[in-house]
Amino acid sequence: MLKPYEMNSILITGPKNLQEKIIKELHKLKILHIVEHLKSELADIGQPLETTNKLSEIIVKVRSLITALGIKQEKNKFELKRGLLEINHTTKKLNEEVNKNFEELRKVEEQLSKNQNTNQELRILKNIGVPLENFTSYKSLAYFTGYLEGKNDITNLEKELSEITKNFMLFDSTLKKQTFMALFIDIKNKENTSNILQKIGFTPINFTNIGGLKGNAVANLEKIERQNTMLMDKSNKIKKQIEKLAQEYKGFLLTADDFLSQELEKAEAPLKFAATKDAFLIKGWVPTENLNNAISKLNKISKDKVFIHHEDAKKEDNVPVKLDNKGYAKPFEFFINLYSLPKYKEIDPTFFMFLTYPIFFGFMLGDFGYGIVSFALFYFLKKKIPKGAALFNVLLLSSAASIFFGFIYGEFFGLEEIGHFAIPHLISRSHGVTELMFISIAIGIIHVNWGLIVGFVNILKEHGLNHALFEKGSWFVLEIGILFLLLSYLNIIEIIPLIGWLFFIVSLIMLYKGEGIKGIIEIPSILTNTLSYLRLMAIGLSSVSIAVVVNDMAAGFFHKGGFMILSGILILLVGHALNIVLGLFGSFLHSLRLHYVEFFSKFFEGGAEKYSPFGAKE
């Protein structure tokens, strides 16, 4: 419980013709954490199995289909009957069908997009009554289409054009406070006309999508609307067909992806092995409890033709860590994984967090009304988000602690009495601030020294008694010295200050010998770390203060009666909801900080690699 699973290093070597059998057996056992081999003069890196390229090609197709069909990862009960052969055949057939549907859908959507652009152009032209076939290239005519800034510009334009030629036709309509015009004029006056239009602020429009259309704009708009209706129907049918394919082949594709991922993992495994021309060598770690079974299975599958060597972990080994905690403490591994895994020889702090994290959380939130609400919320979220079960289990336990402390404080949604009934309590947060301060500091002293004791044990196991005494024992001597000095100078007991100073000086010497100048510099941290636990009181007081303010505001509205009662209820609901959210975030984060910063810094180094057995899923 306080240490990870015991590990043994293992070396497996044998002839190349047995490599694939050994890989398959190891993948099935799911216990070997492979240590990747680096190329050296003695041995090269192994080559992947021959099936690797084929598997890679198929898995790319399968994942492309999963993406194209919008299939989400979920549990399914589909079973492959013919393995890779079935996957290859079905994927090829499905890929052709999906591509065909998407190609048809692409053409439909392209036509819809083109129709939309044509539609926009036709709406501009529908009020000028010019046949669409007139908007084409002429040898003797030029035409201009676009917007003028105002209606008066048409009159001015007609006047100026009349001065240069009588051979022109001008059509106009008003669109969104702008004047659209279409002008046809003999080609020899094209340049002069262009200059006139530029002078009066003409904005040209090019009609690129109406080419080939005949008749008027209104008739063509109706025709396009009918065509769009047909295209939308076709698009919906194709999409339904794609959805049907997704539903029909969802199980197959997810199972195929999982199967191919495992096969590809096996095929690429030799890239982590050492290899010569005729042999392979696998190095890794196996939990000691699984070692004998693994050796037996490998010898059986190879008919005793592989050599297996194993030994206990050495001091200098970088051992992968698999945490070993009972079910009640296991959810708290979430916080350790979030921070850093303990080294193989270090004490695992998961159990300690199980003991203290909910207490800190409950001490701060400490209201049995808030605790009940948060418990119900986290229970609901746990059912809705199964992947977050570990975190929600922690929060459920912490909410239970909040309910417990709510009874200690006698608080229900910030109230210490309901009606004329005073809720029984051991300590009042509203009136016992001094007591809460001393309790918070006492918790800090206990928690910090707990960390120092764990640190002492870690160093004792790793480096021996002398190191442990100088590096961690010095802090206890320092605390004793500070205690004696306080008792002396505050006249609490009759003791000469010299004793306290002697302890203090001895602790400085021990610290310097144990940690060097770093230890001396960190002396103030023992005080700051302890005082940091005052946040247990501060966060709790801020929460209860807000609750009291919300209750008082609501009470003021209740006293006014009538419609104001509804306002009071709204204030209660919104105010307490916001306070619960703030209280939950504050309690969660500050409880975590007290462990990560104040507690872990006294003993925890971390940095271990996570145990990741070959063939096992996350």
Image: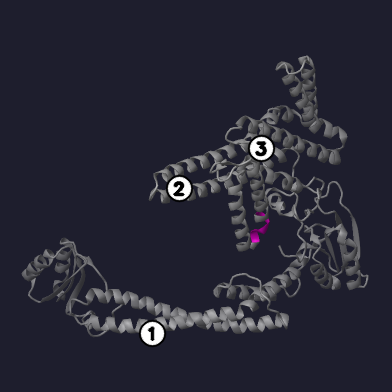
Q: Residues within 10 Å of mark 2 (few under 14, many from 20)?
A: some
Residue 210 sits in quarter: bottom left
Nearer the camera: disc 2 or disc 1: 2
Q: Which mark is residue 571?
A: 2
The percent coordinates of residue 149 (x first, y second) are 18, 62
Q: Secondary structure at mark 2?
A: helix
Tag 1: amino acid: Met
Is the residue 115 above or below the residue 545 in the image? below
Give how far across and how far down residue 405 sits, in percent: 65, 43
Work out whether residue 203 or residue 263 is closer to the camera in this orientation and state it: 263
Of mark 2 and mark 1, the one earlier in the sequence is: 1
Q: Which residue of the protein is positioned furthest toward the front in this rendering?
A: 420
Q: Report the span colored magenta.
A: 387-391
Q: Which mark is residue 426?
A: 3
The first of marks 3 and 1 along the sequence is: 1
Tag 2 and tag 3, C-beta contact below 8 Å? no
Q: Is residue 542 above or below residue 231?
A: above
Mark positioned earlier in the residue sequence (2 or 3): 3
Residue at image point 83% right, 73% down: 21
Look at the picture and state if 156 lies above or below 92. Answer: above
Which amino acid is tagged 2? Ile
Q: Secondary structure at mark 1?
A: helix
**Where does label 1 land, which residue?**
230
Residue type at the position of mark 3 = Leu
Percent position of residue 553, x then y: 45, 42
* Foreground residue among 8 and 544: 544
Tag in front: 3 or 1 = 3
Q: Name the residue: 81% across, 37% down.
A: 456
Inter-mark Cα distance, 2 to 1: 55 Å
Disc 1: CA contacts within 10 A as few (<14), some (14-19) or many (>=20):
few
- Looking at the image, which is closer to me, 429 or 219? 429
- Point out residue 552 in the picture as x, y percentages from the top left corner: 47, 40
